[in-house]
Image (cartoon, grey):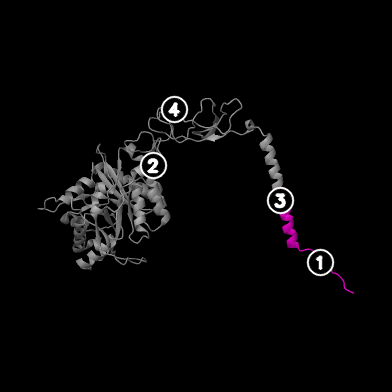
Amino acid sequence: MMYRVTRDPSPVRSGLVHTGLSLLAFSALMAVSGTLIHLTGDASEAGPARQIALFEPAGGDRPNLKTRFAAEDGKARPVVSMMATAEGPSSAVADSTEEQAPSLGVSYAGDDGGGAARPSAMPDEVDTVRINGVAVSAGRSWKETTKLKALPEAPISAVTETAPVGPLPRVADDGRTPAGAYARPFANPENRPKVAIVVGGLGINWRHTTSAIEELPPEITLSFAPTASNLQGWIDQARKAGHEVLLEVPMEPYEFGRESPHSHTLYGEHDDERTRERLEYLLSRATGYFGVTNYQGSKFATDEASTTHLADTLHSRGLALVEDGSLSRSAFTTAAQDTGLRFRKANTPVDARPEGEEIETKLLELEALAMESGSSLGTGFAYPLTIDILKEWTQSLDEKGIILAPASSVTQSSRPAGKSMDTAELVTEQGGQTGG
């Protein structure tokens, strides 16, 4: 005789079935509840909507704020206006008939209240607020403003030479130079003291590079490492945001430390031809820079013959040289004077010790130097701390009577004794230091 054995149901199957039934029942309950609320609910019982506005239109007219719900009589319902006070944010119900715009505690040009200090702005902008380092005027978006501040796209054919190694900068037939063509336009009609800042080491770390390009004011010059991947893309992005650009040239230090030297590092022991070949390779990695700056170079910079040859090569290609201020001994100043190279040595690195108090002290030194001699130049790296401090510091310069200037505007060209100014130098003088 055959017997039929009854087996217990599978616990996994039972669990899945019960879970599915529970979800189905819950979904049905929610659907029924939502339908009932939609059919029988009263819009007048809804909570107030919070409205936020960034600008008020010129002329004092209030923005036309829309309400979330309308009453049966057609009148707007009250909205909650977020007010910034000394004790902190507070809310107040505004009169619906006035359609008040909320206050965010930001003081604009012409404000008489005790709001926050007005961020520095361009001379032709009246009502502005600084967003990611860009002064945005009322009635204009951040995107529109950054587009207006964009520098011309590179390369500019007149100052670009096509060579086997790649595109190289050159002096144009009409005398224009890359130092003038790629520099950020600058005007200083009031002849105010100028402070320039170069932030370097860019193109290696994506986050730090993006932060420097997007958050720092366009007057700050950015320098990029030749080893950066997508170097031309980074330079294009920086120029689109209004920043002029320097290219970093690796030079021989006394010790490389744990860092591997770049394959085209310039060495003092190399002859002129080898130095020129290495320099041209580095210059061909991208276009759009108005000059170069040293990366390391404590040993190379002490070799008078090498620095003179480098300065002469850069001058012949219409470029500028900015020494980063980290070299204790350097022959670059003499080499620039001997060759007529457009040159400037930075007064000090601001974040050799990346500490907040040290950086702020160095920036104060730059302010004092600018007041004393008319201009100063500092350099730094794209550390998050440096970027944060620079954003706040640059907003305070306007009220101190100091103007933030691109590095190209504080470079100078010294003509060798007995040599008259050629056309290239004349154009660079006019293009690189407009109104400076």
**Residue type marked 3:** Leu
Disc 2 versus disc 4: nearer the observer: 2
How many discs appear? 4
Could you tell me how far apart the alpha carbons at marks 2 and 4 are, in whole angstroms? 23 Å
**Residue type marked 4:** Asp
Cβ–Cβ under 8 Å for marks 2 and 4:
no
Which residue does the image show at 34% across and 42% down from the upper left?
Answer: 148
* Location of mark 1 (residue): 7
Tag 2: Cα neighbours inside 10 Å, few (<14), some, or many (≥20)?
A: few
* Location of mark 3 (residue): 24
Among the two numbered marks 2 and 4 on one chain, the one whose residue lies closer to the N terminus: 4
Is 341 above or below relative to 218? below
Disc 3 versus disc 2: nearer the observer: 3
* Location of mark 4 (residue): 61
Among the two numbered marks 1 and 2 on one chain, the one whose residue lies closer to the N terminus: 1
Tag 3: Cα neighbours inside 10 Å, few (<14), some, or many (≥20)?
A: few
* Location of mark 2 (residue): 144
Instruction: Answer with the quarter of the image where residue 405 lies.
Output: top left
Residue stretch rendered in magenta on the structure: 1-26
Among the two numbered marks 1 and 3 on one chain, the one whose residue lies closer to the N terminus: 1
Among the two numbered marks 1 and 4 on one chain, the one whose residue lies closer to the N terminus: 1
